[in-house]
Image (cartoon, coloured by chain):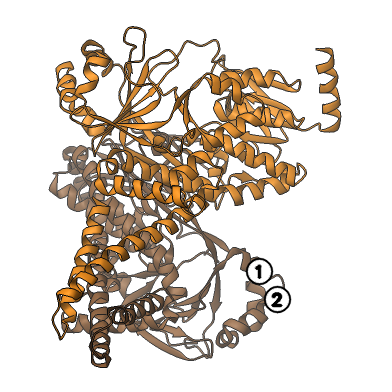
Chain colours: A orange, B brown
Amino acid sequence: RTQAAMEESTSRTTKKKLVAVVGGGLVGSLNACFFAKRGFDVEVFEIREDIRKAKVVRGRSINLALSHRGRQALKHVGIEEKIVSQGIPMQARMIHSLNGKQYPIPYGRKGQVSLSVNNIATFSYYAIYSYPNTKLNFDHKLQDWSTETGLMTFVRPDGSKVQIKADLIVGCDGAFSATRKQFLRRSRFNYSQTYIPHGYMELTMPPVNGEFAMKPNYLHIWPRNTFMMIALPNLDRTFTCTLFMPFEDFEKITTGDEVIKFFQKYFPDTIPLIGVDALKRDYFRLPAQAMVSVKCSPYHIDDKCVLMGDAAHAVVPFYGQGMNAGFEDCIVFDEMMEQFNEDFSAVLPEYSRVRVPDDHAIADLAMYNYIEMRAHVNSKWFLFRKHVDNLLHFLMPKTIIPLYTMVTFTRTRYHEAVQRWHWQNKVINRGLLMSVSGAVLGGSYLLIKSPPNITNLLIPGEKIWSRLTELRTS
Amino acid sequence: RTQAAMEESTSRTTKKKLVAVVGGGLVGSLNACFFAKRGFDVEVFEIREDIRKAKVVRGRSINLALSHRGRQALKHVGIEEKIVSQGIPMQARMIHSLNGKQYPIPYGRKGQVSLSVNNIATFSYYAIYSYPNTKLNFDHKLQDWSTETGLMTFVRPDGSKVQIKADLIVGCDGAFSATRKQFLRRSRFNYSQTYIPHGYMELTMPPVNGEFAMKPNYLHIWPRNTFMMIALPNLDRTFTCTLFMPFEDFEKITTGDEVIKFFQKYFPDTIPLIGVDALKRDYFRLPAQAMVSVKCSPYHIDDKCVLMGDAAHAVVPFYGQGMNAGFEDCIVFDEMMEQFNEDFSAVLPEYSRVRVPDDHAIADLAMYNYIEMRAHVNSKWFLFRKHVDNLLHFLMPKTIIPLYTMVTFTRTRYHEAVQRWHWQNKVINRGLLMSVSGAVLGGSYLLIKSPPNITNLLIPGEKIWSRLTELRTS
């Protein structure tokens, strides 16, 4: 501790700047490590009590999919391996049909896996304490802060107030960010919050004879068009099943028997695995939870404050990128700190400029995948296109890269991934259309006597086009 | 006043319900008349002092375009004629080219005019006082209200507080509504505020020899692609010119000489009319003002509160529908009050359900017109399509109705107008494409020797298509 204290004193002399991280969740606690590593004084302010002391709060999602972007950020502060060793690799989606049949849809190439993880914040907390110039403050609720002076006011559970003046305030306090309120009072701050019509409910699938009840290394999906269920494996060999469904459908089910009837109709294979009694009980434990997508711009106020993670861009959970995007925020910010020599007045505007389009892109993709996961995976066109994409990726690995691969297994900027995806789709769809049209037109030509009837020639092409469009939108 | 007092007492006995209208602007004051006409006790709470006593605040838009929807609402409470007689009819847009040439683009058929109006709220105030059961409260700032009890707390300029309990709270307090804050605290409230990159600045064009400096019965437009200026006539024979331009361009101009240089380059015909000295002075009087588009949903909380006007749907000013949409809100709500026998618990959800898609549609249209007005009106395709649309409307007045006509001169629901517009565009564009393609294919056929080369046949069609697309997006 002596050495640490010395380091701390050196650091304070050279930097002197205090970074206040509001929110000690996944992104806040990781971000604190990034700032601490740079030698800043860092204080984290968390509204809840220390989660390491708290009882586990059930019914809210605790397992998450960790992929490339998130891992890169964890690696930067030296906790990647620890967390990966605690995660369960998921190598593919496993689709459950109504008739109980299962078939996998791979994510990408071999070895490209997402990890089902939880408790990352706990690891970050220990990492934070490995830096001398840091402090974790629990039970601190941000009441207000001044854009002029950076003075922050927190309320403690006993009603007392604490004030602290920070050089930089980093708002990582989630989708309902208190830090963000100050942004909303200013002119020219763009903001949107969109609730989707679906809610979610979590159910637990216990182990069978001490083993996972289903194949563990998959993200299990029961796509049912207007709703779906997914299941992610946990270290304790349970699965957390999450049912996503329109609120009005949740509300239609009011008795235990109706729950069973509903599951018999749509998820019959899960009834013996979750258990009839557990289903009847757990369905009514908590009401379905809402999901919100938040977008805003800019992410900063002057050189005083920056929003990151869900506070800047809460996304719906259907691309498994919420946490990964938040973690990548930390890398991107850190890269700019390097580039602009830790000058907040240069870093903050640049961060907004660069990061906003990427976060908006992943928010849109998550919303899009919400339809794809529950409906498109049932469509023949979708599966056909997945095969075509994978084949082309295999043949031309640098030219055609499936969107999912770019998003999940690379650090290609989200908005560039989307642009590239549109371009690829155009090329591939045109290629498909031309192949088919060419074949049909060629065939038609052979059938035509002279003189050729131009109108007839055009009809088959139109029919193919409309059939492809139909497939595509089915 | 005795009779009025009697009526009031009768009314209180039968209805007893107090409607509190927050905001005494255009929509709030008109809405108060609607509720008063139904016999409710109505109190209006306005944050500002009585505008009839206030000095005119210059530099913020005071003239507005009144069209069909707004007039219908005014008619309902008997003040249409008064206001129309004070307005100046605008029969067409007048486009000013860079070279100083002017040409009109008509809005619709003869007699279909918008009116440049102002001071409507003043008329509404007098109308409000013609009902016995009403009260206007100025200098009342809404601090908070309870969704449980409907208890509202207002702050007076001297810091004192006033509390009042209303049966229904009608939030007409504008784009930055204080009433809406309570909505934002609730789950599943969708909200977005979007600032456009353009700001606006108002300049006055004085009369010349006591007469209007330009033709008065037009909305004058100087479209310059990335920016534009418009001018609306006022009763005192001045024009209010509004310059819309990206903030960064406003900020580039820092001296009086630069203002003149800029106007010489882009609006040379206006310099003698506004005056060199006035230009140099007025450009720097106020910084450019921001414009925001607000969308939200739902518009109500239980049977306690409903948002209307800008509080529910602030739009950018480029379709001239902001006020008209707010006034139409009053009619739509009133129609539902009739339909559901003034049962707030039925009227409020139905109002949200029906009105949200229409308000979102006009918000989107206003945003779209922001591009059309400054850029498309310069495009040949745009003018060509206007002519085609007007011709088709003339030939088939019930089948093809230009969008502008539906929005401005009918009460066709906004979202239905948009749907119909998309359908019409599809039909018209296809018709145009088929005519052209048919002609070209026919021509090509004549040129082809046997055997016909199918590929060559297809190329002209594609070229025409891409040319049309090019024109369309130019």
Q: Is residue A175 left or right of residue B295?
A: right
Cα separation between marks 1 and 2:
8 Å
Q: Amino acid at mark 2?
A: Gly
Q: Is residue A403 left or right of residue B19?
A: right
Q: Quadrant of the C terminus of chain B?
A: bottom left
Give SS at disc 1. loop
Q: Which residue is mark 1?
A: B284
Residue A140 image-quadrant placement: top right
The spot of residue A2 in percent (x, y) is 84, 13
Q: Residue at x 51, y 35 (%)?
A: A310
User: How many numbered callouts?
Assistant: 2
Give SS at disc 2. helix
Label pair 1/2, CB-CB below 8 angstroms? yes
Q: Is residue A303 visible?
A: no
The spot of residue B306 in percent (x, y) is 31, 43
Q: Residue at x 15, y 78 (%)?
A: A448
Q: Which residue is mark 2?
A: B256
Q: Nearer the viewer, residue A116 or B275?
A: A116
Q: Amino acid at mark 1?
A: Phe
Going from the N terminus, do you reach mark 1 or mark 2 first?
2
Asked if residue B315 is positioned above or below residue B163 in the image, the reply reads below
Crowding around mark 1 (Cα neighbors within 10 Å: few <14, some 14 to 19, many 20+) is some
Q: Chain of mark 1?
A: B
The spot of residue B157 in percent (x, y) is 54, 43
Q: Chain of mark 2?
A: B
Q: Residue at x 40, y 84 (%)?
A: B380
Residue A250 image-quadrant placement: top left
Q: Is residue B101 left or right of residue B391?
A: right
Q: Nearer the viewer, residue B305 or B367?
A: B367
Q: Nearer the viewer, residue B144 or A328?
A: A328
